[in-house]
Image (tube, helix red, strand yellow):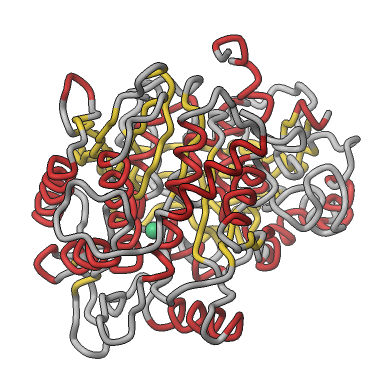
Amino acid sequence: MTRYASLLSLLALAACTAATVATTDRGSTSVSVDRIASDIRTVSSDAFLGRAPATRGEELTTVYIRDRLIAAGVQPGGPNGSWFQEVPLSQSDIVGTPSLSITVNGQTTPLQQGEQIAIRASMLDVDRVDLQNAPLVFLGYGVRAPERSWDDFKGENMRGKVGVVLINDPDFETGQGDFGGKAMTYYGRWTYKYEEGARQGLAGVLVVHETAPASYGWATVKNSNTNTMFDIVRANPAEVHPLVEGWIQRDEAVRIFNAAGQDFDALKRRAQTREFRPVPLGNATFSASYQVRRQSIRSKNILGRLAGTTHPDETILYGAHWDHLGIGAPDARGDSVYNGAVDNGTGIAAVLELSRIFAAGPRPQRSIVFAFWAAEEKGLLGSEYYASNPVYPLEKTVAGFNIDALSPTGRARDVSVVGSGQTDIEDRLQVVLAANNRTMTPDASPEAGYFFRSDHFPMAKRGVPMLYMDSGIDLLTGGTAAGNAFDQAYRRDAYHQPADEYNPATWNLAGIAEDVGVLHQLGMQLANSREWPNYRTTSEFRPVRDKSVSTRR
Ligand SMILES: [Zn+2]
């Protein structure tokens, strides 16, 4: 199709996506504000108990979503004709207080869990960790990026050692270089540092905490690393996890470097260059000893599907996580239900609405899959499980759309794209937006790496072109001032708190309905084309996508 022809069909589609009210689940191809409101209100009600995995809240939520998919006229999309993909999870806790210490020049200094150091309960299949006097080696940013001709390891043998690495990527501080300047590439994320450490055979990886490049303070590190750890059940967890994973305070790291006769700041500057090679920290060693309690729990992804007419083996994927935090500590009002209305009742409702309008319209050439991911709040685990055990081949997944926490702020002139600059899906998005007299706003804080922190990412990491579109901030009523004010108030007063609740008095869902319309048009266009979107040549995910290019025609 020429661009002109596709623009005409987009305009035709745009004409029929004005938000109108539909009274039944089936039959209407228009986006319905009322159906979206009803789904959000239901899944975020107290009756759903905050939708925590492996609880009664999971049972209620997954049955509700399945029933809405059946009512929409969508077919089961899970393995063996089922609606569900079982997601086995493992849960690990450190029993008691771990014994942790550093020895330099014969002098042993104990480290206090949560204070100078934060060690995560081991994700390996072990019930005890006993690491005695493992040599410490400074590994710069701990990055191996062949497409950028960058290798901090230089092929040296890392077996049995504990690597000390810096957070963010090598050009964060200088602001320019091969890693997107201030913007964070995946090489800057702590999850990457541990994964690469495992590939290198390290016994442990300690990430040095510095507030600016991490984008959060030590309190966040302490809170999210010293409690229960979750992972999907993996055939070989050592492929992605070293035995010991943790963070160390900058001041403590500086002390160790000094005692080992090294200068932290000088070594950091060297680490910002390609010439960097691993630096043994004198005779410094690290020891850790603690017991691990392991348990398995089960959760599930929900999958619905509409088979394509001519290319059913090629998939457009829409996904949103269904889980939230469950019942927890009460807030000042005494409310202990973490309803998760915005996060991610809005996403559940948006994907359900997409399933209804796709099912009601003419069937596209490629298949459409509607996914509701488990355990996002525990570390993107449902989507990670799907990406490790894909029901539909990832090489032939044309594109995916992630919806996580849309704003009930009414119509906006724009949409935001988290992690903008990654894929050329954005170019197509801009054509659709232009046809609707709207615009795209790039990621407002690319240095924080939000692209690596929601459910599209497990697929993105494996090369599937993924778009994480979020609500716009330039509101028709009140402009960017009103959009930003809502964002700030939500982060402060409701995000991950019992107050993230549906409020019919203040909410306006017309903007969400319009965004659903945009995602529908974009997916429909791709589903009726022979196009294969891709990562841009500057993206760290382009090489992995290109490896499977011969499977796509
Ligand atoms: Zn979320």
Residue appearing at x 59%, y 37% in the figure: 6
Q: Quadrant of the N terminus?
A: top right
Position of residue 296 measured from the top left corner of the image (x, y, whole percent)? 21, 38
Question: Residue 450: which quarter of the image?
Answer: bottom right
The residue lying toward the viewer, choosing from 477 and 186, is 477
Position of residue 180 measured from the top left corner of the image (x, y, whole percent)? 78, 49
Position of residue 465 measured from the top left corner of the image (x, y, whole percent)? 56, 35
Left or right: 459 as drawn, with respect to 294 = right
The residue lying toward the viewer, choosing from 208 and 79, is 79
Question: Residue 302: which quarter of the image?
Answer: top left
Q: Is residue 484 above or below residue 228?
A: below
Position of residue 406 measured from the top left corner of the image (x, y, whole percent)? 42, 64
Q: Is residue 17 above or below residue 216?
A: above
**Residue found farthest to the top:** 550
Q: Quadrant of the C terminus?
A: top right
Quarter of the rendered image showing ligand 1: bottom left
